[in-house]
Image (cartoon, coloured by chain):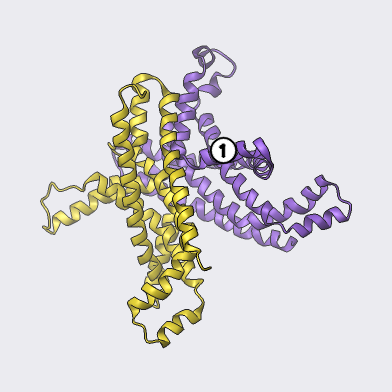
Chain colours: A yellow, B purple
Amino acid sequence: MTGGYGAQFLAGILLTLQVSLGSYAVGLAFGVLGAAAKLSRRRLLRVLGSLYTITVRAMPELLLLLIAFYVLAGAIAGLVASIGLVQSDFSFDPLLVAIVSLGFIQGAYVTEILRAGVLALPKGQGDAALALGLSWPVRWGRVLGPQVLRHALPALGNVWLNATKDSSLISVVGAFADILKVSSLAASDTKEYIFFYSLAALCFLVISAASMLGLKALQARGARGA
Amino acid sequence: MNFSLTFLLTQVMPQLIAAIPVTLELTLLSALGSAALGMPLALALGAKGWVRWSAEAYSLIIRGTPMLVQIYLIYYGLGSLIPHRWMRHSWASPLLRDAFWYGLVALIIDETAYVAVILRSGLDGVPRGEREAAAALGLSRLTSFLRIELPRALMITLPTLSSELILLLKSTVLVSTITVFDVLGTANVIRFQTLRVLEPLLGAAIVYIVLVGAISLITMAIEPCFVRMR
């Protein structure tokens, strides 16, 4: 059906999923750190947090990805090598650079979502947890965290949908055989541009539609008892 | 990597600034185009039967696929459908050979779906009582829509629409992958010609941050005027 490109497409789908899942996990981690910084009592952390969300959200994703690949990855590798942690010919795995930089971008959006979720908590919830003598991990893990998540779930779902679509940007920067790159190669080999780019669109559409169904179920579960 | 401020200021920035009109043209033309097409699509999303289904299918397909795929599909796919004769010798050949127009069409097709969904949510957010009140006052359906529902929906969605404009500005960079020389496209040309990476990319980052900042300031200044209309 795909003229001998079936295996490549399958590998492309797996790579796209890998980059999406990886960058989303990294994005959640950056988001938790960013939200903690923006809600911190320390002014310096708040300023750093704002700097992070404002600059990242003001820059096009593709530009940030190019900067990460062609400027930052080399500079950081050089820095680590110069202090003798690794050999001088060291360079980062491009896949790792892609995942971390896409995650860094999503983290800025997750930061704002989690911050809004924390600010939406009724103040009494934290006070009550304190009054009950609950420790910090229990307070956030069992009382406040779940309420933040319930509030943030729809927006975090949107970040995931964007993560799957933004993963296609890696086809521009490196030698990644993701869905889009595989279809570009197949299209220019066979001149069947419409067929192969439609196939790429279909792959992404299936991923998005499946995600939407999953997110809907997750939201229904998150809203129970509400 | 050594950074040269003089190279950035004397070589890179003038070229990038000269490319700002291309980025702004792409942004504003696709904003206008998607507003014009997004409104009927938003109405279709609220209709019944096959009109609604096709509108929902359109918004699902567009919003469920990466914009880069749509751009390639339009540029390479549509481009491969157009007969060579038209490309080379016809009144339309300057249009058909310029990647700018393919990029613009792709941006409009993509953005229309997002604008329509936003407008639909705004229209849904207008309290039913207002439409009923308009009907009770004897306003026609059209007058009620134009004078009551639409302004209310726009007020509700204005913050979302202005952040969508910023997202649109940022997504115009994707047309640099099909040889449109917008700000990022120009930065890439400088990169390949001079083999310097840091200055062109940093310069582009500065330009986009300033543009996004300017748009946010403008929308922040405009929004209170609309709120006052309430």
**Circle 1 crowding by C-alpha within 10 Å: few under 14, some 14–19, many from 20:** few
Residue at x 36% of width, y 59% of height:
A28
Quadrant of res A164 = top left
Above or below, comparing residue A150 to residue B57 in the picture: below
Q: Nearer the viewer, residue A141 or A113?
A: A141
Above or below, comparing residue A79 to residue B107 in the picture: below
- For the C terminus of chain B, give its image quadrant: bottom right
Mark 1 highlights which residue? B57
Quadrant of res A33 = bottom left
Chain letter of the residue beneath label 1 in the structure image: B
Quadrant of res A110 = bottom left
Describe residue B18's horizontal placement relative to residue B219 as left or right.
left
Q: Position of residue A71 (x, y in %)?
A: 28, 48
Residue at x 34% of width, y 21% of height:
A3
Residue placed farthest to the right in the image? B138
Q: Position of residue B68 (x, y in %)?
A: 44, 37
Q: Position of residue A173 (x, y in %)?
A: 32, 39
Amino acid type at mark 1: Ala
Q: Position of residue A195 (x, y in %)?
A: 43, 24
Number of disc labels: 1
Query: What is the secondary structure assignment of the residue under circle 1?
Result: helix
Q: Nearer the viewer, residue B67 or B84?
A: B67
> Can residue A83 be seen in this snapshot?
yes
> Can residue B9 be seen in this snapshot?
no
Residue placed farthest to the front in the image? A225
Residue at x 41% of width, y 50% of height:
B205
Residue at x 64% of width, y 49% of height:
B119
